Amino acid sequence: MASSEEIILYYESGSTPCMAIMLALEEKGASYTKKEVDTEKDEDIAMLEEVADRDEPPALLHGDQVLFDEVVPACLYLEKIFDNNRMIPEGAVQRAHVIKRMIQAQKIGVGDTSIDAYWEDDEEDEEEDDNMDEEKAEALEEKEDKQDLAEELEEWEFYLTKGSFIAGSEFTMADCVFIPVLIYLVTNGLDLTKKYPLLHKYYTTVMERPSVVEVGKHHQIDAEDIFKDMPTGVLAAVGDIVKGFFGKLVNK
């Protein structure tokens, strides 16, 4: 399929996976059409089901083909079809490293493993909470969820000790997937300055990137302060020795 065929991205404002694919398109300098949809509107859902056989964005179309509704395969496709501005290294080890970071970022920002999923009850949690006051149980669960997220963010803080970007010294597809997640967190109250200085520097830098500025024009995230008052992550709490040990583990 020729890269010159029409590309259409159906997106919803504020959606992290939609932002990631749009960012990849912008970084590639691709000519494409943006079509915003609202999943609160029945007519938009019906339109998506007609053109992409699904009821929620993102939906990426190239020519007459419905390509991808998942971030990582969409970014891999765009890397292959647009050979300008390489964003995934050709070397086997470096390529695997970038793809690994893409998948890790997707797990904290997309689909069933999204950040929002930290606040979803499961049956096990409900059983544990049977004998607890409902408000107390919810407060405990939120505290545990925020601790989990703080530990996750410590890993990404550590990755930035290895380079200015998520997978090293160059901006890659891993950044395209991770940046929307970080924007979502910051918009909803995460203060990077207190506990994550490298992430704060990274965020400040990438927010001035032309592609990120352009994507920001099409996305509005409702701020709810759900990530304010985050606890200190495990790595920061236990000190540099354990951080160094943990770093060896995550790089295996």
Image (spheres, rainbow, N blue to C red):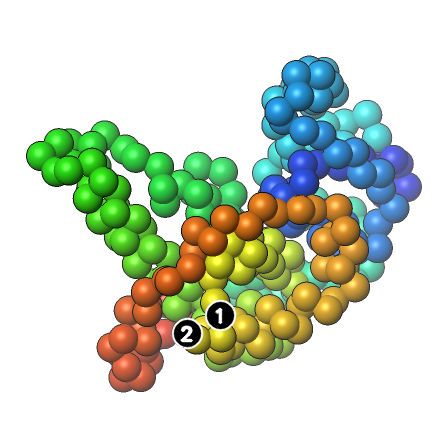
Counting from the top left corner in percent of width and height, residue 156 is at 46, 66
Q: Residue furthest left?
A: 131
Give residue 195's mark.
2
Counting from the top left corner in percent of width and height, residue 125 is at 21, 37
Task: Residue type at mark 1: give it.
Answer: Leu
Left or right placement of residue 196 versus residue 187 in this view: left
In which image quadrant can residue 132 be found? top left
Sort mark 2 into few (<14), some (14-19) or many (20+) by Cα contacts within 10 Å: some
Q: Are marks 1 and 2 in contact (CB under 8 Å)?
A: yes
Counting from the top left corner in percent of width and height, residue 64 is at 81, 25
| Residue located beneath label 1 in the image | 192
Left or right placement of residue 196 versus residue 220 in this view: left
Q: Which type of secondary structure does the marked residue at label 2 adopt?
A: helix
Counting from the top left corner in percent of width and height, residue 140 is at 22, 49
Sort mark 1 into few (<14), some (14-19) or many (20+) by Cα contacts within 10 Å: some
Q: Is residue 185 visible?
A: no
